[in-house]
Image (tube, rainbow, N blue to C red):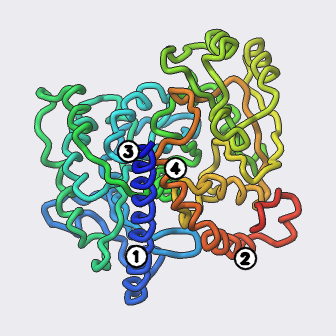
Amino acid sequence: MFSLALSRRNAFSTVILFFFAAASVTIFRSWVRSKQYAHKYDAVDWKIADLDSRLPTNEHRRIEHISDDLTTADHCVFYNFLRSTDTETTDHEPITLALHSTINYAEHVIKHAENWDDVLSYAIFLFPRHDEALQALAMLHKCHDTVNRKVSIHLVWNRNFLIESCVSDNIVKNIATIPESLGSCDDFDIESFVEKLKEVKVPFGSYPINVMRNEARRGAATKLHIIGDIETQYSPAFAVNVRPLAQQLLNGYLGKAVLVYRRFELDENEKFPTNLRRFSNLLADKKIVQFHVKHYRVGHFIPNLQHWLQYSLNNDEVTFDNVSYISSEWEPQFIMRHDAPYHYEHVPTRMTDHQFLCYELCRAGYSYLLMTHVYNIHPGIKDGATPLEKSLGIYGLAQTDPTMRKFRAYINARYPIYQKSRCPNWKNYL
């Protein structure tokens, strides 16, 4: 009992120290920014060639400084640090799978590149010294044909407090020339790449999840986006199956809408189902369950599962049903157009971060259309939050009031107040 109490006390102390450290950083950043001349983006559209005359001019590779405004948080971005080489034209608009993570999860991009039938935009958040692992990532992009063809990779990091321009940051000097200084692919192998990533240590800190979701979208080269979690996997031929509906969405035939897909969790002892019949059997055996049904049901539950399954098993055409947005806690994932609202970035991770976009879509007049046939799956059935998630959640909850006040001012200024009546209340805030 004593050791348990001690461990709880140590965990609580860690959370308190993290809270005060984060608060101090926020105050210091605000003071520094108040001394600077801030734009939404740097006044100059910095090109990589501006850094060093040795670098080739490439209009797609660029560095931008995103400054604080009503919806965006201050950070730096290196777009197309590694760019897909696929230049094939198609008779349809591709759906960009927008992924994000820290660099120690980068091995998962191989699976996504092999399974996703369109292109990928992958944003990586760099903590200090993580740029040292980028050499291995660049070798993967150079030497793995599918990754090279499909995936564009963007780097995101927090700007040095005392450096006004992202281009002057030391991290840029360390990484800008990596793609041009790679060796031969003869010595490259996937196992060494994975082992290199396992050596990367991720510090206890806040991952800016909404910033990362947005940068994966901003780095996309197409007009259709789907934001994915790096560890999940999509049903076979997902992009091909939804292509007719996605083109209708793009062309405005579905009105202001997003295309929702169902999400599930899979018992870790089972293999990913390769067809709907196998999926149905695993669902019947409770080896597949709806996403977070045990952990956060109100946020992810979608009704009429059996009806959805029976239609999908017995019909070839992918269609949709309208799903009502009846709770501000509901946070589905979906396909959207490039001009749909972006995530609100002034949100601590684990503070209902995705719900801000779902609520804004409602205020903006969007409909939620649930597609048949397609889904994605996260490995493992989650029973509850991890200690780290709980710690970050405590910090996030402490920021609820100031975050919601800021969001309320933004949302009510952008969308007419009367539109609130068609959206559910958000506790005591909206």
- At label 1, the amino acid type is Ser
Q: Which residue is mark 3?
A: 152
Q: Earlier in the sequence, mark 1 or mark 2?
A: 1
Alpha-carbon span between mark 4 and mark 2 = 33 Å
- Residue at the spot 19% in from the left edge and 26% down from the top edge: 189
Q: Left or right: 228 with respect to 374?
A: left
Which element carries disc 1, helix, strand or loop? Answer: helix
Alpha-carbon span between mark 1 and mark 4 = 21 Å
**CB of mark 3 within 8 Å of CB of mark 4?**
no
- At label 4, the amino acid type is Lys
Alpha-carbon span between mark 1 and mark 3 = 35 Å
Q: Callout 1: 10 Å neighbours few (<14), some, many (20+)?
A: few
Q: Left or right: 210 with respect to 146?
A: right
Alpha-carbon span between mark 2 and mark 3 = 35 Å
Q: Nearer the viewer, mark 1 or mark 2?
A: 1
- Residue at the spot 76% in from the left edge and 60% down from the top edge: 426
Say which mark, if any, is on residue 24.
Answer: 1
Alpha-carbon span between mark 1 and mark 2 = 30 Å
Say which mark, if any, is on residue 413.
Answer: 2
Quadrant in the picture for the N terminus: top left
103 or 96, which lies in front?
A: 103
Residue 71 appears at what percent x and percent y? 57, 69
Q: Is residue 194 above or below residue 282?
A: below
373 or 15, which lies in front?
A: 15
Residue 247 appears at what percent x and percent y? 67, 38
